[in-house]
Amino acid sequence: MAKLAELIKKVKADFKSQYNYLTDDEVEGIYEQALYTYLDLAFPYHYEVVEIPEDRPRAIYWVKDCMKEIIDRNGITATSYSENGLSYTWSTDMVSDILRQRVIGLCGVRGSKR
């Protein structure tokens, strides 16, 4: 499997080519927003974790999906919307419930023994 740094670089490049109207700085900003959203959900009490751990390489695909949500929402923070059979319910933290449910938070301390 590719190293995490290579996966991150690939995700950013793919995102840039998919949304070619974005600048590199905008892609980086969206990546950082999605990354910190993931870290807040996955490691709510581990503030020292500031990047995806090497033992969780699949998390980059969650971040990629979050980046897409950020673009799709275009800054809209709907809490509820329904029209013509289409319904949106987004939380105030800009992450859909479906995306949030894919993250299992780490609340304990690694390596602790009882």
Image (spheres, grey):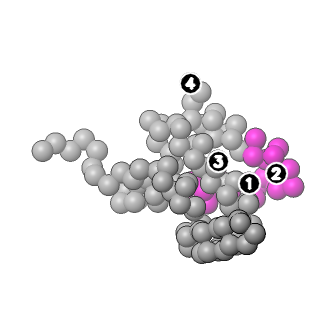
x and y, in percent, of residue 45 in the image: 36, 60
3D distance between C-alphas at marks 1 and 2: 9 Å
* Circle nearer the viewer, 4 or 3: 3
Q: Are marks 2 and 4 in contact (CB under 8 Å)?
A: no
**Contact? badges 1 and 2 (CB < 8 Å):** yes
Amino acid at the residue labelled 4: Met
| Horizontal and vertical percent position of residue 49 | 43, 52
The amino acid at mark 1 is Val
Residue under label 1? 27
Q: Earlier in the sequence, mark 1 or mark 4?
A: 4
C-alpha separation, residue under disc 2 versus residue under disc 3 = 13 Å
Q: Amino acid at mark 2?
A: Tyr
In magenta, the rendered stretch is 13-37
* Quarter placement of the N terminus: top right
Residue 2, x across and y down, in percent: 59, 27
Q: Residue furthest left?
A: 114
Name the disc covering residue 19, or none.
2
Q: Residues within 10 Å of mark 2 (few under 14, many from 20)?
A: few
**Vertical relation: 17 (above or below) 82:** above
First in sequence: mark 2 vs mark 4: 4
Q: Identify the secondary structure beneath mark 1.
A: helix
Q: CA distance from mark 1 to mark 4?
A: 24 Å
In the image: residue 83, left or right of residue 64: right
Mark 1 or mark 3, which is nearer the start of the sequence? 1
Q: Secondary structure at mark 3?
A: helix
Residue marked by disc 3 = 64
Residue 83 x, y percent position in the rendering: 73, 72
Q: Dot 4: few (<14), some (14–19), or many (≥20) neighbours within 10 Å?
A: few
Number of other residues with Cα within 10 Å of mark 3, as a class: few under 14, some 14 to 19, many 20 or more: many
How far separated are the C-alphas under marks 4 and 3?
18 Å
Mark seen at residue 1: 4
